[in-house]
């Protein structure tokens, strides 16, 4: 359960962004979270609310967009979605696919702020 | 009240990644090969590390940082092999992060070091998100844990560079299916280098030593660019 640490890093990150833009009144935080980032979405939503308490982000809402796992199949030379997070291979030709294109993301994508 | 959208695109782990990147550069400048060790609790990280330190200390300068929630037990144990051991007690934190490594190095009078090992808190989930500036991450899996561990914890196996199957001396007693374990590792991290060892009997340790020595001999690879963190 490191989602609380992640939530605190996120809030620091947003505070930095806000400060660099002269202070933002953040209402909604849009985040992109890869299925292979090792972070649980619901645990993060829960931790975010807790971590926001007493910060300028208190009362803000976190919306998480899940980024799927995409790999590159060297045989088919195509982007593919592996059968599961524990079968990192091409679903068509079953070739191993060490190259991961998406799925590890953990980023604050955008902020909805009071105009 | 109306709102407007502000594009940010900031990595959540940016601070940690920048710090890890700086550590990695520093280790490379100092010619220190840094290896991270991750595994579940009780899979034999410390026993394996004891053997590594003792074996490498014959011809190399070695050191270790060991993370645990509490106690100095591991450091005391490892100090039998080298005095250059420091414990990081994390309190309630379930993983090490780059700032803990930086702080540990700050007040540590560590001279020139060929190998620095960083033993993470026993945990197969949380450490996967934190780059510590290590050159390679070893993930350990013991023969007594069951061969499907890699499938159950794909993120940490995928984010590691080398898999070490430990407690091979107990494989028969535990009815450990080695072929299945290797298949499962390959499934979550295609092409992963795998070693089978026993810290008790010394089985497989020579191969690990050779691998590590080759690593210092011709590694010195360029620092991976953290393009997103650098933004």
Image: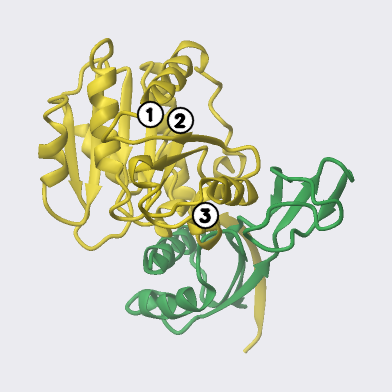
Chain colours: A green, B yellow
In the picture, the quarter occupied by the C terminus of chain A is bottom right
Image coordinates for residue A74, horizontal then vertical, percent: 82, 40
Q: Which residue is mark 2?
A: B135
Asked if residue B220 lies left or right of residue B110, the reply is right
Of mark 2 and mark 1, the one earlier in the sequence is 1
Asked whether the beta carbons under mark 2 and mark 3 sit within 8 Å of each other, the answer is no
Above or below for B215 versus B217 = below
Residue drawn at the location 47% of the way across and 73% of the way down: A44
Image coordinates for residue A23, horizontal then vertical, percent: 48, 66
Asked whether the beta carbons under mark 2 and mark 1 sit within 8 Å of each other, the answer is yes
Residue drawn at the location 38% of the way across and 16% of the way down: B31
Of mark 3 and mark 1, the one earlier in the sequence is 1
Quadrant hosting residue A37? bottom right
**Label 3 marks which chain's residue?**
B
Image coordinates for residue A104, horizontal then vertical, percent: 61, 55
Q: Which residue is mark 3?
A: B150
Quadrant hosting residue B117? top left
């Amino acid at each position: 359960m490191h989602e609380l640490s992640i939530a605190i890093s996120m809030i620091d990150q947003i505070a930095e962004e806000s400060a660099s833009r002269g202070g933002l009144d953040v209402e909604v935080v849009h985040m992109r979270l890869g299925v292979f980032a090792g972070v649980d979405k619901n645990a993060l939503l829960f931790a975010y609310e807790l971590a926001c308490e007493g910060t300028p982000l208190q009362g803000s809402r976190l919306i998480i967009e899940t980024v799927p796992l995409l790999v590159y199949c060297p045989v088919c030379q195509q982007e593919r979605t592996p059968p599961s997070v524990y079968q990192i291979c091409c679903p068509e030709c079953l070739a191993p696919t060490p190259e991961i294109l998406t799925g590890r993301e953990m980023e604050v994508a955008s902020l909805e702020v009071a105009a | 009240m109306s709102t407007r959208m502000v594009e940010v695109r900031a990595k959540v782990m940016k601070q940690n990644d920048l710090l890890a990147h700086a550590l990695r550069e520093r280790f490379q400048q100092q010619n220190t090969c840094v290896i991270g060790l991750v595994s579940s609790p009780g899979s034999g990280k410390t026993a394996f590390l004891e053997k590594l330190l003792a074996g490498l200390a014959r011809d190399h300068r070695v050191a270790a940082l060991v993370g645990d929630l509490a106690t100095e037990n591991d450091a005391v144990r490892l100090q039998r092999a080298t005095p250059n051991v420091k414990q990081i007690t994390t309190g309630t934190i379930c993983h090490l992060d780059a700032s803990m490594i930086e702080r540990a190095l700050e007040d540590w009078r560590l001279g020139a070091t060929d190998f620095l090992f960083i033993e993470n808190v026993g945990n197969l989930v949380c450490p996967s998100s934190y780059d510590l500036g290590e050159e390679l991450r070893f993930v350990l899996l013991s023969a007594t844990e069951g061969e499907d561990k890699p499938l159950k914890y794909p993120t940490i196996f995928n984010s590691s560079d080398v898999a070490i199957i430990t407690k091979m001396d107990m494989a028969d007693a535990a009815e450990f299916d080695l072929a299945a374990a290797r298949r499962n590792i390959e499934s979550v991290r295609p092409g992963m280098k795998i070693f089978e060892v026993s810290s008790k009997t010394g089985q497989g340790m020579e191969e690990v030593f050779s691998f590590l020595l080759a690593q210092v001999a011709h590694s010195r690879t360029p620092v991976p660019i953290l393009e997103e963190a650098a933004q």
